[in-house]
Amino acid sequence: MSGRSRRLIPSADAPSAPTTRGIVASPAIRLLAGAGTSSYGDWLTTVALVVLLYRLTNSPLGPAGYMLARVAPKVVGPFPGGALADRYGPARVATACALLQAALTASIIVSANHQVIWAIYVAVALAQFFGAAAQPCYTALIPRVTTPGQLGRIQGIYSALGSSSLLVAPALGALALSITSPQVLIGADAATFAVAAILVSSITGVGHVTRDAQTSKRFSAGIPIVMRDPTLRFLAAAYISNAAAVTAVQAVLVVAAAQRFGHDADVGWLYAAVGAGSLLGTLPVIRRTPGRVTTLPIAIAAVVELAPLALFVFATALPEGIVLLFASGLGATLYQTRGVIGVQQRVPSELLGRTMAVIRSAQYGGMLLGAIAALALVQPLGWQATVLIVCAVGATFLFFTAVSETGHSSP
């Protein structure tokens, strides 16, 4: 994968990169608008569904089961999504995924109205599979709609939209749930997926793509790329460990809000705190595209995300919980934005979808582990012990990964 040995040939099916004198060109605006719209709707649905299922089941197993249905399909979704994006174009695949998500999300309303709980879990699982398949597509689209000098800004704005959706949408959800039903929020989410499909579909065929005569066509071509690069290896490990901890907290957050802070709807403010921290974490890369991304800043920021999640167990008032989750969200975005830019800088366009599929699959694998841990431990041990155990295991995994990387880099 050395840049010195790679022979790059312009793609015959894509024009040159769009010229940009401002922050973004028109295709980038449509990409950001589509991704941002669907992100806002997705977080409305997350808040609505954890509250809905907690009320329907009157048990912490309801939202914990939802988190399992939400994350399990994501582990495998990025691989077909990334492979199809590299073959047929990321905009086409992302558009198809958004349309399928819109239909599946709308079906949840019918199931909720008839209290068919198993059907809600099935629709969530399928919608999340297609959502995961779309993620490598969005990442692969970003270098195609901008120039290398603007890469940090576009990636930063893309991350900021996701972070702001986590800040704004849960707060709106918490307010809306006091005057309307969760089904209304779920319907709004279905509409956002349809809007995203319209916007992203117009991006087909734009951007700069490179072709390499030596490029592997294997479905799993991204795996050796990640495994050979120490920074990408650590990034994948951080996604596994921290995603497990975050998901475990998410699975019990509505329970914590009800038991510790007084009302289940307070979960919206806790999600919003994560979003506020995440939004602040995007500012450095928006201001300046990082140079060659290295492991150390990723490692520091990963710890900044993980430690407050463990400390959240000891929060006794809502403001304390908000501050801790704000700090965790800040650390998460600091390492994730730099890590993704590192992938985009290292990997040619024709392999970017499959390489990001590996990173996303690592993230979703961690989420699955966290959801399984929450489902298995929350009933016998309680939510506090569940969070502490998952955070401790994640910290241990990060430590040994860092030590291993140091050993590999030693002379």
Image (cartoon, rainbow, N blue to C red):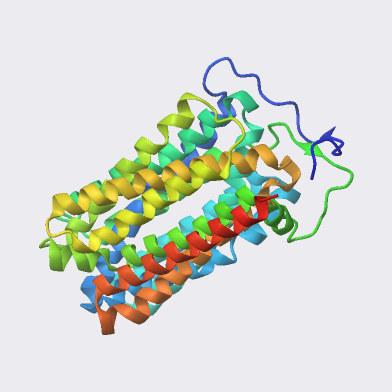
Q: Position of residue 169 (x, y in %)?
A: 30, 47
Question: As drawn, is 70 to the left or to the right of 115?
Answer: right
The residue sitting at 23% across, 78% down in the picture is 59
Q: Is residue 59 above or below residue 150?
A: below
Displayed quadrant of residue 403: bottom right
In the image as oriented, which residue stretches furthest toward the top? 21
In the image as oriented, which residue stretches furthest toward the front? 411
Can you see residue 130? Answer: no
In the image as oriented, which residue stretches furthest toward the right? 213
Q: Position of residue 307 (x, y in %)?
A: 34, 55
Can you see residue 41? Answer: yes
Q: 217 or 344, which is in the foreground?
A: 344
Q: Position of residue 275 (x, y in %)?
A: 33, 45
Q: 60 or 394, which is in the foreground?
A: 394
Q: Is residue 59 above or below residue 85?
A: below
Question: As drawn, is 174 to the left or to the right of 375?
Answer: left
Q: Is residue 229 above or below residue 31?
A: below
Q: 330 or 37, which is in the foreground?
A: 330
Q: Position of residue 301 (x, y in %)?
A: 43, 46
